[in-house]
Amino acid sequence: MNFMVPIKGKVQFAITLDPTVWIFDDRRIDLEQFFHTTYEEVDEDTKYLQGMGKHWSREIMEGSTAPPTLKAEETFSLKKELKDTLGIHFKHFLKNAEPHEDATTIVFEQTTGEEVAIPYDRLNDVILQYSLRGKPLREDGPVYVLFADGSNVKDPIRHVQAIRIE
């Protein structure tokens, strides 16, 4: 199975997505949390400032030496993420491809030969799921297409091999 997903069509830059490395992307979403609780996307600058504030407070309280618990905390966090069902909003990637202003449709080409088309104005609703309980989507992936309203959580668009902007 090819794990690369090209974005092509009415874009300034045709790019290729590699879902196998998204586990390291800070924009990832825990989909269990997203669809079952209240979820807010955090601005990267705000997240950075909050992280620096926590780090500063910790240094004030514990001193600047790295306590032995830091590695354990990082390991726990990574182990948790390796068991999660994760995705990323598609808009982050499409922004880099720079779609043409006259784009009207997003088409998901499937390995089955079928295509699923949605209006371009639903871009903010599209989430690309890339793992299920910590495992890559090998059989019917490499990504599933979900809608943020949860309307297709039980039956996502599978077997996506390319994304075409029309």
Image (cartoon, rainbow, N blue to C red):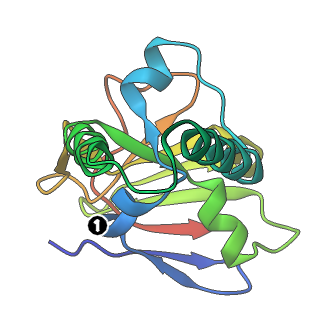
The answer to whether residue 141 is above or below residue 150 is: below
The residue sitting at 56% across, 69% down in the picture is 164
Amino acid type, callout 1 = Thr
Residue 149 vertical position relative to residue 129 in the rendered view, above or below:
above
**Residue 76 screen position, x and y as percent:** 23, 39
Left or right relative to 57: residue 162: left
Answer with left or right where residue 122 lies relative to residue 25: right
Residue 17, by quadrant, is: bottom left
Residue 128, given in percent of the width and then of the height, sits at 45, 49
Residue 121 pos. (x, y %): 77, 45
| On-image quarter of the N terminus | bottom left
Q: Residue shown at 57%/54% (left/top)?
A: 90
Q: Which residue is mark 1?
A: 20
Looking at the image, residue 123 lies above or below residue 7: above
Q: Secondary structure at mark 1?
A: helix
Spot the residue most to the front.
Answer: 63
Q: Does any portion of residue 166 appear in the rendered image? A: no
